[in-house]
Amino acid sequence: SAVISQKPSRDICQRGTSLTIQCQVDSQVTMMFWYRQQPGQSLTLIATANQGSEATYESGFVIDKFPISRPNLTFSTLTVSNMSPEDSSIYLCSVGQGWAEQFFGPGTRLTVL
Amino acid sequence: KQEVTQIPAALSVPEGENLVLNCSFTDSAIYNLQWFRQDPGKGLTSLLLIQSSQREQTSGRLNASLDKSSGRSTLYIAASQPGDSATYLCAALNSGGSNYKLTFGKGTLLTVNP
């Protein structure tokens, strides 16, 4: 298993601003994932972040809005840019090795006013 | 495109009852299926992982089965307790081009009443 931490755990932001969420893992992992969970909804994959390559975004998500960094095998950041109230969600990172079990961080609860 | 459906959306049972949560998926070309638990406002806790070649997995009072050909999985909880109250999510892992993609259902909200 992997222990994953996220910062911040929650934040309240003004529209038009940006927030960077950090994800730290206690071991080296190849694949890290970023998900969004909108209120009352299930999780939707935003992008897959592999170290040393550009993140791969899912349909409906673009790099300008959700830039991702993956500087090493234990850390990644997701930035939510030019926020609007529709971006209010829980953002979760997860890690997994290929088709093995995925483990999730505690999430970042974002409220945009 | 994989789609995952969970039935029922909500379930309320008295303590001690055995119960079954259902999950169905449209694309049977999965690598595995994973069951998670989510407490309100929290992240996900992995409960059970069933590889595509397996039929079931057990952990304590939990038993998950997988029928890949029919696109179904069930999570059986024995002797339910109030502490089992949470949202239960199933997720199917498929190949997404050069990556792996986990597709989630909307979850079953379980309430176990003392």
Image (cartoon, rainbow, N blue to C red):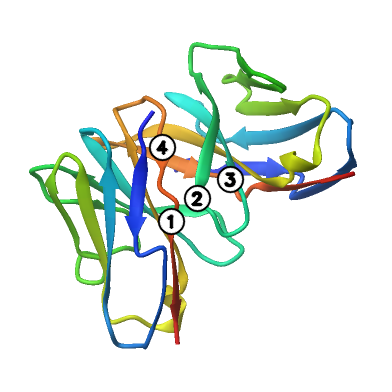
Q: Chain of mark 3?
A: B
Number of the front mark, 1 or 3: 1
Residue that numbered label 1 is attached to: A107
CB contact under 8 Å: marks 1 and 2: yes
Three-letter amino acid code at the position of disc 2: Gly
Label 3 secondary element: loop
CB contact under 8 Å: marks 1 and 3: no
Label 1 secondary element: loop
Examine the rendered structure and indicate whether residue A10 appears above or below residue B45. below
Q: Are marks 1 and 3 on the same chain?
A: no
Examine the rendered structure and indicate whether residue A28 appears above or below residue B5. above
Residue that numbered label 4 is attached to: A103
Residue that numbered label 2 is attached to: B43
Tell me the quarter of the image containing the N terminus of chain A: top left
Mark number, residue B7: none
B89 displayed left or right of A98: right
The percent position of residue A21, horizontal first and vertical second, equals 29, 63
Mark number, residue B105: 3
Label 3 and label 2: CA atoms lie apart by: 15 Å
